[in-house]
Amino acid sequence: MLIYQSWTLYLIFRYPISGITLVANSSEQWFIHSVDSDKVAAQLQLSAGDRVTAVDGEKPRDYWAVARFHTVDQADTLTIMRDDAIHEVQLRNIASPDAYDILCLTAEAFSLSIAFFLYKRVRNSISAPCLSLVFLDIGLVFMSIGGSVRGDPAGKFFTGAFLRKCRLCRIFIRGLPQTYPDFASKHLVTFGGLFYVDGTCGVLPVSYPVYSMMGTSVLIVTVIGVTANFLALVSIQSRHRK
């Protein structure tokens, strides 16, 4: 896990999120279809319809991210043609990490902290190990997002894989009533856990346009939700420890 975390941090600090999507015509000429961030488009002076002649010195069709996803990921330069003039755009000028990355890293840290707390402090609980695995998976999802939005195949794979594992939440909900007899606290944690997982699943398709439309707001709510979960779990553990 440490190796994968190091890799995702490298991608986050090395490459910005460009959000540039390309489209090809019948003559295999590539054009900018959209730029997800208006700020990035204005900063780089890009607009839909600009013809792309090279990505990092390679023809667009030969660049791996364009060939696989029609996106400009993990690239330093973009060569475009506009009004019969050639322009070289420096993608490294985009700020990285950005606010979205910081939110993801924050949510990851919260999730992994809760997983560690449950595993170390509530070992005598029946459902705590299952809940710990749920938050571990959620933390790993957030760990994978940084690579996924930058076109990293491993990031896209692990984002989907860990999301599927989040279905362990059902196991924790079935076992929770046996562990925490406090009715109000029990339902607070059950609702919070469901809200957190559902909020996470709602923001994690592999297409960056979805991230840009709803990612930041959902991530903020998610961080608030996981913080509430953490405080509720600490309160319950302190009241019902044996």
Image (cartoon, rainbow, N blue to C red):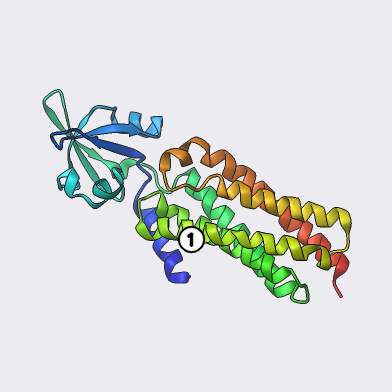
Q: Secondary structure at mark 1?
A: helix
Residue ID at (51%, 49%): 102
- The answer to whether 123 appears left or right of 99 in the picture is right
* Quadrant housing the C terminus: bottom right
> Residue extending furthest top?
83
Q: Report crowding for label 1: few under 14, some 14 to 19, many 20 or more residues within 10 A (C-alpha).
A: some
Q: Which residue is mark 1?
A: 161
Which residue is at the far left? 84
User: Of residues 137 and 7, which is closer to you in this image?
Assistant: 137
Q: Residue at x 87, y 65 (%)?
A: 239
Residue 26 position within the rendered picture, expressed as x and y whole percent measured from the top left: 16, 33
For residue 238, above or below residue 55: below
Figure quadrant of residue 131: bottom right
Q: Amino acid at mark 1?
A: Ala
Q: Is residue 65 left or right of residue 29?
A: right
- Residue 133 is situated, as x and y percent measured from the top left of the image, at 62, 67
